[in-house]
Image: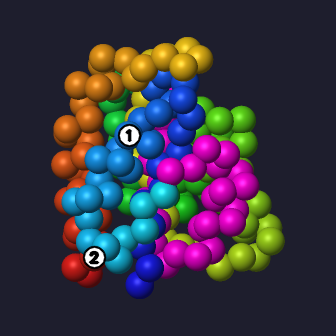
C-alpha cells in the first residue's frame, strides 16, 4: 500500500499551512509514507493522485468557520462528489482535480482531507496567530491518523 501526505499551499499567509504541516510531519512518519508539498493543485494532484493507494490532502480553505478551525474528512471522495465550489483556496482546487480524474477514468486512491479554515492570504505574509496556535494539535491528529493507516 502506497500512502501519500500531500500539503497544498503558497507563500501567502494562511495558505502556507499545508506546507508547514507536511514539514512538521515528515520526520515523524514511517519512511514508506510519501510527503509532498505542492503549489498548483490541479496539475500536481492530477499527476500524483493516481500514484497512491491512499492519500491525505492538507489544505487551507474557506469553510465559513472561525480561522484556525480544522476538519478531518475520512471519506474525502464522498465529500468531493458533493462539492459545487472549490475545496481549496486555489482557483482550481481539490474537487476539480478529483472530478477531472474521474472523467478521465483514472485509478483513484482512497482520499482523506484535512482542511484548515484560513483567515488571511496576504502576499508573503506569515501564517496568522490563530492558525499558528493550532499547529501542534493539527500535527498530533495527523500523526496519529497516518500511523493508524500504516498499521491497517
What residue did someone put label 2 on?
Answer: 150
Membership of 55 in magenta stretch: yes
Q: How is the image coloured?
A: rainbow
Q: Is residue 45 visible?
A: yes
Residue 17: quarter of image: top left
Q: Which mark is residue 105?
A: none
| Quadrant (top left/top right/bottom left/bottom right) for the C terminus | bottom left
Q: Is residue 115 visible?
A: no
Closer to the camera in the image, 104 or 133: 133
Against 97, residue 138 (above or below) is above
Secondary structure category for the residue under label 2: helix
Q: Position of residue 55 (x, y in %)?
A: 46, 66
Residue 138: quarter of image: top left
In the rendered image, the residue lying farthest to the right is 104
The residue located at (27%, 76%) in the rendering is 150
What residue did someone put label 1 on?
Answer: 20
Secondary structure category for the residue under label 1: helix
Write down the region rendered in magenta: 37-63
Q: Position of residue 82 (x, y in %)?
A: 61, 50
Against 33, residue 16 (above or below) is above
Foreground mark, 1 or 2?
1
Closer to the camera in the image, 105 or 125: 125
Amino acid at each position: 500500500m502506497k500512502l501519500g501526505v500531500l500539503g497544498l499551499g503558497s507563500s501567502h499567509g494562511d495558505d502556507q499551512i499545508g506546507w508547514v504541516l507536511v514539514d512538521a510531519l515528515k520526520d515523524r512518519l514511517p519512511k514508506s509514507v510519501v510527503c509532498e508539498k505542492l503549489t498548483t493543485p490541479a496539475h500536481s494532484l492530477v499527476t500524483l493522485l493516481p500514484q497512491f493507494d491512499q492519500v491525505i490532502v492538507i489544505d487551507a480553505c474557506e469553510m465559513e468557520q472561525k480561522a484556525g478551525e480544522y476538519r478531518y474528512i475520512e471519506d474525502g471522495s464522498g465529500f468531493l462528489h458533493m462539492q459545487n465550489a472549490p475545496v481549496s483556496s486555489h482557483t482550481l482546487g481539490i474537487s476539480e482535480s478529483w472530478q477531472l480524474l474521474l472523467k478521465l477514468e483514472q485509478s483513484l486512491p482512497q482520499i482523506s482531507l484535512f482542511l484548515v479554515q484560513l483567515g488571511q492570504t496576504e502576499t508573503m505574509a506569515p501564517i496568522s496567530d490563530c492558525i499558528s496556535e493550532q499547529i501542534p494539535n493539527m500535527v498530533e491528529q495527523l500523526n496519529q491518523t497516518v500511523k493508524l493507516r500504516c498499521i491497517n
